[in-house]
Amino acid sequence: EPEVTQTPSHQVTQMGQEVILRCVPISNHLYFYWYRQILGQKVEFLVSFYNNEISEKSEIFDDQFSVERPDGSNFTLKIRSTKLEDSAMYFCASRWQWDTGELFFGEGSRLTVL
Amino acid sequence: GQQVMQIPQYQHVQEGEDFTTYCNSSTTLSNIQWYKQRPGGHPVFLIQLVKSGEVKKQKRLTFQFGEAKKNSSLHITATQTTDVGTYFCAGVDAGNNRKLIWGLGTSLAVNP
């Protein structure tokens, strides 16, 4: 069964450092997403990406965040200067259509900022 | 702004008891999805409801979409320990932006 893969599974970093989280969405999907989940809380939307550009972003996704699809397969989330409150599980997701159909989630990258 | 309220936040049941979680949207939805997240896991799609008044069943799980397409429920009959996790609803706003709006989730604990 096709799956979304994410690396690393866990990253520990010092406050102020840059972090890149990587995702390989399902190959024929067109819409890509990053979500964040602070421990025990809800899934929070960060950004959606389609046709090589951001289609929507939330208030959380400020200028410290950026996304890129550098080649035909990878989809990355960069945090330029991490803060303590960036500690969370980051999920990548993808799907075929914009407003319907299953969102396939990766297993997540846990980011710990010290 | 657009919101999807989900209640209850937590539910603790004895194995064999039934469980229901409810979602209510402030706006009309074009469709609503339900996801389950096991402890330590990632959200996994359960189902999508599209039609007004739609009811779908998956074994012991029954999903409903309200007539006005503003509310939905997930009912589990005779819970088992494998049902433990957090259940999220996520609705697509029927307006122009077609945004997917997530509920806060209901965490279900089942005592064996």
Image: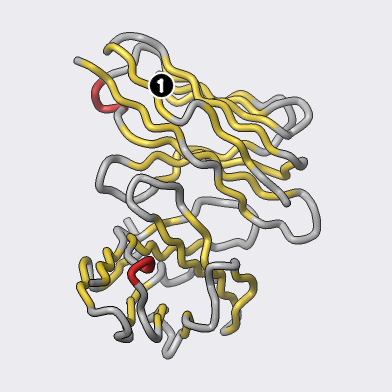
Check the image and report above or below for B45 versus B20: below
**How many numbered dots are placed on residues in this image?**
1
In the picture, the quarter occupied by the N terminus of chain A is bottom left
Q: Amino acid at mark 1?
A: Lys
Question: Where is residue B17 drawn, in percent x and y?
Answer: 35, 9
Question: Where is residue B51 drawn, in percent x and y?
Answer: 71, 34
In the picture, the quarter occupied by the C terminus of chain A is bottom left
Q: Is residue A24 toward the left or the right of residue B68 in the image?
A: left
Picture quadrant of residue B76: top left
Picture quadrant of residue B91: top right
Label 1 packing within 10 angstroms: few (<14), some (14-19), many (20+): few
For residue B31, say whether it is visible.
yes
Q: Chain of mark 1?
A: B
For residue A3, say whether it is visible.
no
Relative to the observer, which residue lies in front, A30 or A84? A84
Question: Where is residue B23 drawn, in percent x and y?
Answer: 60, 32
Relative to the observer, which residue lies in front, A41 or A34? A41
Check the image and report above or below for A113 versus B8: below
Secondary structure under the numbered disc 1 in the rendered image: loop
Residue ID for mark 1: B59
At x 28%, y 68%, the residue is A111
